[in-house]
Image (cartoon, helix red, strand yellow):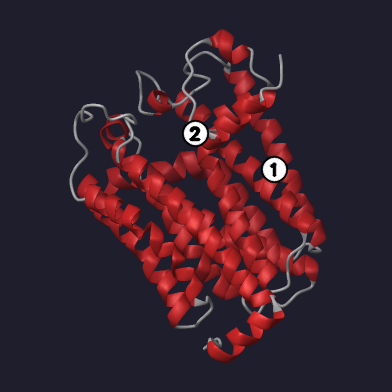
Amino acid sequence: MNINFAMWRKASWQLIKMEDKKEWDSLDVVSKWLIATRSAVTLVTVYSCVIAGLLAWRDGNFSWIPFLILTIGLFIAHGTNNILNDYTDYSRGVDKDNYFRTQYGVHPLVQGFFTKPQQIRWFLISGLLASLAGIYALVATNFHPYVIGLFAFGALVLLAYTYPFKYWGLGEFAIFLIWGPIMIGGVYLVMALIKGGDLSNLWNVVLAGIPYGLGVASINIAKHIDKHDDDKSKGVGTFPVRVGESFARRVDQVAVILIYVIIAYLVFVPRYFTPVMLIVFLAFRHAWNAVKLLNNPRPANPPPGYPAWPTWFSAVTFFHNRQFGGWLILGLIVDTLLHVIPFTAALIARYWPPM
């Protein structure tokens, strides 16, 4: 078994479809983990942590070691959740009969790449590694009550997302909270506590986390709309199953539009951001493509030459979030530099002071 760095890059950026067990067995451990946990999707966790890190740097609360430990730990925690998700759905019989999940990526249990005991071992090892990052945060902040609450809430969502939250129609809302205000605000909080910095901007940071959380949730809602019929037939009560496919499409449209409304609010009302953050509107045409596509039900069959079936709404919302996330990070880098460079910080204080 050789280390396959090319597969690491590929699996970190796109979903891998693989049918041959011999090919799977020849992969190194990291490649298997990245593919099995769908790391092209779990990359959203890294984006959330980078957003938190930039906001912490802007406020003088950034340190590299806490940032790297928290980012790696949360990335592994997201992958751990996906391993458990596959195990739970497989055990409940949801992922059988060419179910949606098995059509766009590797499902190690369904395809016989892993046995159930092997999947549990991968879950336990990943969970242990993720927990070490959480323990570091607890110790480094002297077991601050907020950090204890964040650790407990994260563990609860990791264990309960697939069942029962997703079956109760709460999974999508949990995803919005976790990858938006809670993760971005939480990583910022931990770094600020470790640094002994000022927490006066914490609630602005939490609000600034909402747009990215909405972007991640929009993908999840769209995915569950895509597999609405399969989920309903198998008794999986996702949000679209609970409220209906049509209403779920309208909610997803609102989520995508609100991303840009909140960014504009943060620029013009509290002036937490400078106008440079309006650069995110360069992704708005992709948002509008998603909104337009969500106007109509998913077709029964893919159009000729369509490459991403069975994903439909989830494909366009995923692409939008990638574009929006990229512009958001770039905007935050520039906005942060403007706040930390003394000359430009003085100009901001004079011409664009916080309200």
Name the kind of residue labelled 2 in the image: Gln
* Mark drawn on residue 27: none
Secondary element at tag 2: loop
Residue 44 visible in the displayed image? yes
Q: Nearer the viewer, mark 2 or mark 1?
A: 2
Horizontal and vertical percent position of residue 85: 51, 34
Q: Residue at left 45%, top 42%?
A: 164
Q: Quadrant of residue 227?
A: top left
Quarter of the figure that contains the N terminus: top right
Q: Residue at left 40%, top 45%?
A: 319
| CB within 8 Å, label 2 to label 1 | no
Q: Specify whether 148 is left or right of 333.
A: right
Secondary element at tag 1: helix
Name the kind of residue labelled 1 in the image: Ala
Q: Specify whether 317 is left or right of 82.
A: left
User: Where 315 sits versus 253, above or below?
Assistant: above
Q: Specify whether 209 is left or right of 241.
A: right
Residue at mark 1: 130
Horizontal and vertical percent position of residue 324: 44, 55
Label 1: few (<14), some (14–19) or many (≥20) C-alpha neighbours in 10 Å: many
Instruction: Give the alpha-carbon distance from disc 2 to disc 1, as whole Å.
Output: 23 Å
Q: Residue at left 68%, top 23%?
A: 29
User: Where 138 sits versus 220, above or below?
Assistant: below
Mark 2 vs 1, N-terminal side: 2
Residue at mark 2: 14
Furthest-bottom residue in this view = 350
Closer-to-camera residue (289/254): 289
Closer-to-camera residue (206/275): 275
Q: Specify whether 155 is left or right of 178.
A: right
Closer-to-camera residue (209/337): 337
Furthest-top residue in this view = 22
